[in-house]
């Protein structure tokens, strides 16, 4: 589990195609502190398991399912990525609950100073609501506008400076993870004719 608050910006320095997966190598510093083999590091929104590391880089494997659902391909080589270690149980949750399980990809269609407009598929956008939370390339953001397959997020100066959003351009692809709470509600209410306060309370909401 992650918070969606990037700890640092890393760089992908290796991308090797294997028989049934891809091995990537990422240059980093802060997220390597205390890291051991088997730990999780969210890399541009994708939860990756560290397979090996040095004092300057870590390696991880990407299975075909992750490649299919994310923007990750050979073009990732040399790109900057947002990095976050898994949340500790005694940590503060400053963002929102982020799993590192990407739902799909969106495309930046407009940038107006600190406002980013993103287009995605209806399968994803139906879970994105105004003033709700969404993770874009692993960054927890609040939705400022949502309409059909288009939504917007606004970044404060601190978020712009601390993340890869400062490098993004129109037509860039981004990894999207919607808020898991919306999916739970959908599953619980799918076969219900009526959703009221009692139903929500009985199911932990």
Image: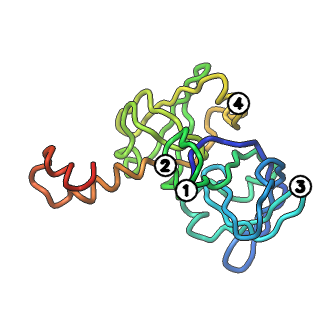
4 or 1: tag closer to the N-terminus: 1
The residue sitting at the left extreme is 193
Q: Relative to 161, does residue 99 appear above or below in the rendering? A: below
State how far apart marks 3 and 1 are (Cα). 24 Å
Q: According to the image, label 4 marks what residue? A: 166
Query: Looking at the rendered structure, which numbered label has been put on residue 169?
Result: none
Tell me if mark 3 has few (under 14), some (14-19) or many (20+) residues whose alpha carbon lies within 10 angstroms of its own: few
Tell me if mark 4 has few (under 14), some (14-19) or many (20+) residues whose alpha carbon lies within 10 angstroms of its own: few
Circles 1 and 2: CB atoms closer than 8 Å: yes
Q: State the quadrant of the N terminus.
A: bottom right
The residue sitting at the front extreme is 90
Q: According to the image, label 3 marks what residue? A: 56
Q: Position of residue 130 (x, y in %)?
A: 37, 31
Observer-side mark, 3 or 1, equals 1
Answer with left or right where residue 7 lies relative to residue 187.
Answer: right
Give the residue drawn at x 27%, y 48%: 205
Query: Looking at the rendered structure, which numbered label has been put on residue 97?
Result: 2
State how far apart marks 4 and 3 are (Cα). 23 Å
Q: How many marks?
A: 4
Q: Position of residue 122 (x, y in %)?
A: 37, 47
Secondary structure category for the residue under label 3: loop
Give the residue drawn at x 67%, y 26%: 158
Secondary structure category for the residue under label 2: loop
Tell me if mark 2 has few (under 14), some (14-19) or many (20+) residues whose alpha carbon lies within 10 angstroms of its own: some
């Amino acid at each position: 589990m992650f918070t969606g608050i990037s700890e640092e910006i890393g760089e992908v320095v290796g991308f090797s195609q294997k028989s049934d997966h891809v091995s990537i190598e990422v240059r980093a510093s802060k997220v390597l502190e205390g890291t051991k083999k088997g730990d999780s590091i969210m890399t541009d929104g994708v939860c990756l398991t560290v397979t090996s590391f040095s004092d300057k880089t870590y390696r991880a494997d990407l299975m075909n399912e992750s490649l299919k659902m994310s923007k990750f391909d050979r073009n990732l080589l040399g790109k900057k990525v947002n990095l976050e270690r898994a949340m500790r149980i005694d940590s503060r949750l400053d963002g929102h609950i982020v799993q590192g399980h990407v739902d799909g990809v969106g495309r930046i269609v407009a940038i107006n100073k600190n406002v980013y407009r993103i287009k995605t598929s209806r399968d994803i956008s139906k879970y994105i609501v105004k003033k709700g939370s969404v993770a874009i390339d692993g960054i927890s953001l609040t939705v400022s506008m949502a309409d059909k397959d288009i939504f917007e997020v606004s970044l404060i100066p601190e978020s712009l400076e601390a993340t890869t959003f400062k490098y993004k351009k129109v037509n860039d692809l981004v990894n999207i993870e919607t808020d898991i709470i919306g999916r739970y509600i959908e599953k619980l209410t799918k076969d219900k004719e009526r959703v009221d306060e009692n139903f929500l309370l009985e199911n932990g909401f």
